[in-house]
Amino acid sequence: MEQENQWSEPSNPTPAAGGSVGLHPAQSPYNARVVGREEVNPQLLILRVQPDAALFDFKPGQFAVLGLLGSEPRVAEAAPEEVIPPGDKIIRRAYSVASSSRERRYAEFIITLVTSGDLTPRLFALRDGDPLFLGPKASGVFTLDRVPPGKAVILIATGTGLAPYISMLRTLLLRDTERRFVVLHGARFGWDLGYRGELESLTRLRPNFTYIPSITRPDQDPHFLGLTGRIQALLEQGVVEREAGIPLDPNLADVFLCGNPDMVSSVNAILEAKGFKAGRGKEPGTIHVEKYW
């Protein structure tokens, strides 16, 4: 889903106050602006984007497209560009929406800096009020639509693969008090665990929610006091059963996977050995995967 190096001609140009580099404001392809910006760490950014018109409807778990012209500045940490993109073409990339579908003012995204990429070094250079392109609709089937009501969901992610789950929790957790939700999130360091504070608060407030964070480089983050190790190893050690009291049983829970392809592949094999199956055609399955790389 996330792909760098996608350039395209501006489509359906709409005016945006402030314009864009190299274009007259009336010719700007931008249709949204930044209304919130939080650096979780120097390489992890939460961006809130407000469209000039009404925000599209979407389901928690879906993704939308962000874009900037090739002429826009990049952050100083970015690597030199081997191929400089055309300044008058929009670089586009899809990102999962992290905000609640009930939030109508803006769409929120969490983004990792790819120093050699085309788009993320430009997104990191944005400041409050800066214009950008936001796709006119959301897409994707990585939602809870095909999970039976009341059935537990185990949401497994690495890095920014957490984003679609944040949207699900923000939208559904407060009103869906019967379904059990579990988030198992892995990262290299504690400071890479985006939304950690919010998820820890939800654990205290919602008895049907369990948050299980883990890091893989504890020797470089001695202040982190939680679990350590790769997601796949923790699953084999029974972390979900131990921390949430939910057996890894396809009759009792569906599992969602989003993040590093190696993690997804390894966990998928573990789940299949326990009787979980991916959906095929009209058969919904009990494993749901978003290809996030």
Image (cartoon, grey):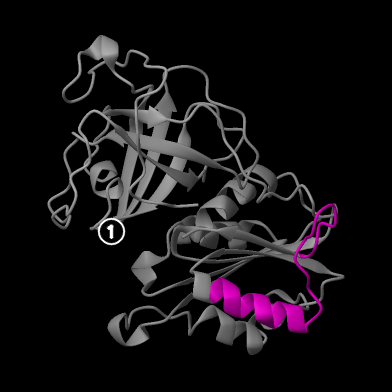
Q: Residue at x 34, y 23 (%)?
A: 30
Q: Is residue 238 located in the magenta-colored stretch of the structure?
A: no
Q: Position of residue 27 (x, y in %)?
A: 28, 13
Q: Could you tell whether 251 is left or right of 286 in the image?
A: right
Is residue 268 placed above or below 1 in the rendered structure? Answer: below
Q: Which residue is mark 1?
A: 43
Q: Quadrant of residue 62?
A: top right
Extreme residue in the top direction: 26
Q: Residues within 10 Å of mark 1 (few under 14, many from 20)?
A: some
Q: Is residue 52 above or below residue 99?
A: above
What residue is drawn where x is 53% and y is 59%? 199
Q: Is residue 98 left or right of residue 126?
A: right
Stretch in magenta: 263-286
Where, by quadrant of the figure, is residue 270 drawn? bottom right
x, y (%) of residue 99? 53, 41
In the image, is residue 268 part of the stretch drawn in magenta? Answer: yes
Amino acid type, callout 1: Gln
Q: Return the x and y of residue 6 as percentages of the image width and height.
A: 36, 43
Of 205 and 74, which appears nearest the observer?
74
Determine the secondary structure under disc 1: loop
The answer to whether residue 243 shows anywhere in this view is no
